[in-house]
Image (cartoon, rainbow, N blue to C red):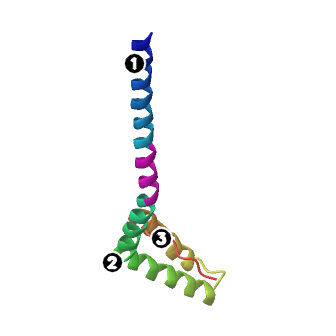
Amino acid sequence: MAIFQKKQKKLLIILGSITLLFSIFTGLALIIAPKYLETKQIERDDTTKCKSYRALEEIAVAMYRNDPDGADWLLKAKEAETRRKQHKCSQIIFK
């Protein structure tokens, strides 16, 4: 009977330790991952490709403000959106 209780205690301690380690690693991942991903996004947004997306977007907005019924601004906007998705740039929003 005593041997059985020792094995149960040992198993309980091992399972508790594994659960604790898993919880610690999960917590660390939840803290570190967003900062890492945000840093990578900032680096991507600073590339020439993302800067060209923003320039195209600004051109499309300027063309829209000059002629909202024209089709040229829509072509520029679609081209800008394609670049944004292709290079995984942050979306800019004009008001």
| Circles 1, 2 touching at the beta carbon (< 8 Å) | no
- Residue type at tag 2: Thr
The magenta span reads: 23-31
The residue furthest front is 2
Identified at 46% across, 55% down, the residue is 30
SS type, badge 3: loop
Q: Which quadrant of the figure contains the C terminus?
A: bottom right
Main SS, magenta region, reads: helix
Q: In terms of sequence position, does the residue under pointer 3 or pointer 1 come before the other?
A: 1
Q: CA distance from mark 3 to mark 1?
A: 55 Å
Figure quadrant of residue 18 = top left
21 and 41: which is toward the camera: 21
Q: Residue at x 51, y 71 (%)?
A: 91
Location of the N terminus by quadrant is top left
Query: Which residue position is annotated with label 1?
Result: 7
In front: mark 3 or mark 1?
A: 1
Image height of 46 relative to 39, above or below: below
Q: Are marks 2 and 3 in contact (CB under 8 Å)?
A: no
The Cα atoms of the two marked residues, 1 and 2, are separated by 62 Å
- What is the quadrant of residue 87 in the picture? bottom left
Task: Look at the image and say whether residue 7 sits in the magenta stretch.
Answer: no
Disc 2 marks which residue?
48
Q: x%, y% of residue 35?
A: 42, 65
Q: Which residue is mark 3?
A: 90
- Which residue is outermost to the bottom? 66
- Crowding near pointer 2: few (<14 within 10 Å), some, many (20+)? few
Marks 2 and 3, Cα distance to the nearest angstrom?
13 Å
Label 1 sits on a secondary structure element that is helix
